[in-house]
Image (cartoon, rainbow, N blue to C red):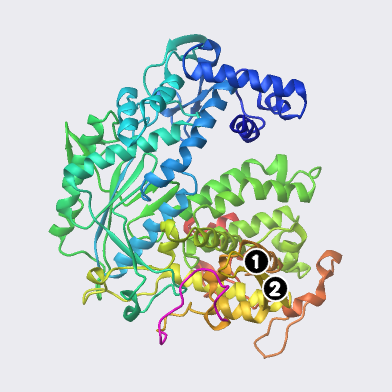
């Protein structure tokens, strides 16, 4: 009964289902005799249905809804994504089974699988891949990354083989029978050319079922175990410590508390990536993995030579001392040759490939990813121009809320390992600033004529700069992964490094890690803001080690010092402090890892960071070339508001001067505020994003 009540509470309102809507089921949670009797009767009926004693045929009915894939021709069946609409009561049964199964698969499924498991996320897989490839590239090591994507992964699963995998995973026959009861005797209705077709479902697991992701990751795990025993998966070691230093000195890397993980295989449900360090192993595993999955009933995306495919491999070349090429032209051509998998099908080498929503390129710059994101955002923003952004009947608060809901999530998706120094990022930031100016009803001419600062526009709209959005997402993610401890590969990857046998050799090029540089800048900014705007003291509840709690009081200066401690790249005598609780540690050992372990304290620090949400804008009180403070008085009331706070704001972000043909564009002293002075300046290339201003 408790499980049934929890399943009803978890049912989301507004979901399309057959039978009773979720809103009607939630009425049964009222505490009265009639609701108790209905729930008890429903529970008895569900038990008989699962045991197949009395089958409810209407619960077994399902309806397929086809969703067109973005950028695909809708008249091709492969370009339609089919979603299953299920009966709400059948969905409750599968939701209960999924909750029973969740702790088991979390314990049994290895960490390389990030999908369908509670507490794991796609962002960890993307970050680990980005971080480790960057380490190997800067160490002068070549890496081949094989990306595989299954054709209609859930829909093509052989149910007989799935039930065998469940038994091998540890299910007893009673548990397997419960899963079979969810699939047998099911009828599927679909509308084709305005005609309704009904057929019996005998293949696959339905997308839209709460139980399907868990079943698929179990199937994928068993298939991978069988492959590993026969072909031996490629090994790719990642070392790390729960330290506070992002660039750990070589003298401290292989001492005690070192954690090693094999990340040669990374997967999120059916999206799989194999990291391989030689061309011979690439040919072996590329063909063997394709054939093995086909034997298990899952066909992978492949294509003929010269055709596009969702599967492919990216060749990440190691940086050499004085050059970036991998060798001679013959060696380069051999490394980039297609993988023959049989039947005339190949797995081709690609310069960039989209994996889990991020475009991974062989230079690991992600410039193409940011450029495509910029184009998509501009297209969507332009479509809503007349109906929303330029509509005088829509309030500014509603426009800002719509922008935060529709555009900000796309701007910050998987931004943890992306650099903020490229021209593409600055163009994306310029587009974001322009959108904020449109929402605030201020154009660049009015801004120049009335001396309106970008700081005032952001305060008026209540929106934040792109730098603040990315910093906030990074800090929240670091805190979330840090609290998972060693159970999170993403947490280990925050301060990971290459093992000794993969360290920087004589051919490697020492280059600053852009991810570490970004982390250090973000933590330093948080420390500065806390020391400037934070409360004088913070009460932190810590475990005293004896099943009790103690209250420790930290000043904002102590927290600022803790956030900065250990983030430099220099070695420290006596080693570095590890992560964990701060109850038994002195302030001299407290680092950002201990601070991030406390959820309540972290929430308060992020609230303080909101006071500097317009970071990157030109501030009032800026020092001019003559050494005197520049002051500009604004003629509008809303920009004059809180003028006294401008003296304490952070320094502007410095960027390099950039020019264009004819001198039409100039870069100001803050990121993302380009102001064209002539019409010719708007005819620059698409690459720098100035046409969006």
Residue 610, picture quadrant: bottom right
Tell me: residue 207, above or below residue 461.
above
Give the numbered dot on residue 538: 2
Q: Which residue is drawn at 48% across and 64% down?
A: 423
Corner quadrant of residue 383: top right
Which image quadrant: the N terminus? top right
Q: Where is residue 76 in the image (x, y as percent from the top left)?
A: 40, 24
User: Looking at the picture, does residue 524 appear above or below residue 76?
Assistant: below
Mark with earlier residue (1, 2): 2
Query: Is residue 308 visible in this depiction of the protein?
Result: no
Name the residue rendered at 50%, 15% in the picture. 60
Q: Where is the C terminus found, in terms of image quarters?
A: bottom right
Q: Is residue 533 above or below residue 675?
A: below
Q: Is residue 159 visible?
A: yes
Q: Mark 1 points at which residue?
A: 601
Question: CB under 8 Å between callouts 1 and 2?
Answer: yes
Q: Is residue 439 left or right of residue 5?
A: right
Image position, residue 362 (x, y; %): 32, 57
Circle 1 SS class: helix
In the rendered structure, which segment of residues is drawn in magenta?
A: 572-586
Residue 205 location, quadrant: top left
């Amino acid at each position: 009964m408790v499980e049934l009540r929890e399943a009803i509470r978890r049912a989301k309102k507004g979901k399309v289902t057959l039978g009773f809507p979720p809103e009607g089921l939630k009425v049964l949670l009222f505490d009265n005799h009639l609701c108790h009797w209905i729930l008890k009767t429903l529970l008895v009926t569900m038990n008989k249905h699962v045991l197949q004693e009395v089958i409810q045929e209407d619960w077994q009915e399902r309806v397929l809804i086809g969703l067109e894939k973005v950028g695909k021709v809708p008249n091709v069946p492969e370009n339609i994504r089919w979603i299953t609409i299920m009966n709400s009561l059948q969905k409750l049964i599968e939701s209960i089974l999924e909750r029973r199964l969740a702790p088991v698969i979390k314990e049994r499924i290895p960490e390389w699988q990030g999908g369908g498991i509670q507490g794991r996320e796609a962002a960890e897989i993307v970050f680990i891949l980005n971080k480790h490839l960057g380490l190997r590239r800067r160490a002068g090591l070549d890496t081949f990354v094989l990306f595989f994507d299954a054709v209609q992964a859930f829909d093509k699963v052989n149910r007989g083989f799935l039930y065998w995998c469940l038994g091998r995973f540890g299910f007893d026959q009673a548990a397997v029978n419960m899963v079979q009861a969810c699939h047998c005797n099911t009828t599927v209705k679909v509308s084709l050319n305005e005609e309704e077709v009904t057929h019996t479902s005998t293949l696959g697991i339905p997308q839209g079922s709460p139980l399907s992701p868990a079943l698929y990751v179990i199937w994928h795990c068993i298939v991978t175990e069988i492959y590993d025993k026969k072909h031996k998966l490629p090994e790719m070691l990642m070392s790390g410590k729960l330290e506070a230093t992002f660039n750990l000195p070589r003298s401290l890397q292989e001492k005690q508390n070192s954690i090693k993980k094999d990340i040669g295989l990374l997967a999120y449900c059916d999206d799989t990536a194999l990291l391989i360090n030689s061309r011979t192993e690439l040919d072996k595993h590329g063909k063997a993995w394709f054939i093995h999955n086909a034997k298990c009933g899952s066909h992978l995306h492949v294509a003929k030579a010269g055709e596009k495919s969702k599967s492919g491999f990216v060749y990440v070349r190691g940086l050499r001392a004085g050059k970036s090429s991998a060798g001679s032209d013959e060696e380069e051509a051999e490394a980039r040759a297609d993988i023959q998998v049989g039947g005339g099908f190949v797995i081709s080498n690609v310069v960039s490939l989209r994996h889990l929503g991020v475009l991974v390129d062989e230079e690991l710059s992600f410039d193409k990813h940011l450029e495509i994101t910029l184009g998509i955002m501009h297209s969507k923003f332009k479509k809503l121009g007349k109906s929303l952004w330029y509509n005088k009947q829509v309030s500014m608060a509603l426009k800002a809320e719509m922008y935060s809901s529709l555009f900000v999530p796309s701007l910050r998706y998987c931004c943890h390992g992306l650099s903020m120094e490229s021209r593409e990022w600055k163009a994306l930031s310029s587009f974001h600033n322009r959108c904020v100016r449109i929402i605030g009803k201020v154009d660049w001419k009015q801004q120049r004529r009335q001396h309106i600062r970008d700081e005032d526009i952001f305060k008026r709209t209540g929106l934040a700069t792109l730098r603040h959005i990315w910093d906030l997402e990074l800090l929240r993610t670091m805190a979330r992964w840090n609290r998972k401890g060693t159970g999170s590969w993403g947490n280990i990857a925050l301060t990971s490094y290459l093992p000794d046998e993969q360290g920087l050799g004589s051919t490697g090029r020492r280059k600053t890690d852009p991810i570490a540089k970004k982390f250090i800048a973000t933590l330093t900014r948080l420390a500065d803001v806390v020391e400037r705007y934070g409360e004088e003291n913070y009460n932190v509840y810590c475990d005293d080690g004896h099943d009790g709690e103690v209250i420790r009081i930290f000043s904002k200066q102590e927290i600022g010092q803790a956030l900065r401690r250990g983030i430099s790249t220099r070695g420290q005598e006596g080693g570095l402090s590890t992560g964990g609780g701060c109850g038994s540690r002195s302030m001299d050992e407290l680092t950002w890892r201990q601070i991030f372990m406390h959820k309540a304290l972290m929430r308060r620090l992020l609230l303080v960071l909101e006071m500097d949400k317009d970071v990157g804008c030109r501030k009032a009180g800026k020092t001019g070339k003559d050494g005197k403070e520049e002051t500009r008085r604004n003629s509008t009331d809303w920009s004059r508001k809180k003028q006294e706070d401008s003296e304490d704001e952070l320094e502007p972000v410095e960027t390099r001067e950039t020019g264009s043909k004819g001198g039409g564009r100039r870069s100001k002293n803050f990121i993302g505020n380009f102001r064209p002075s002539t019409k010719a300046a708007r005819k620059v290339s698409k690459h720098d994003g100035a046409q969006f201003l």
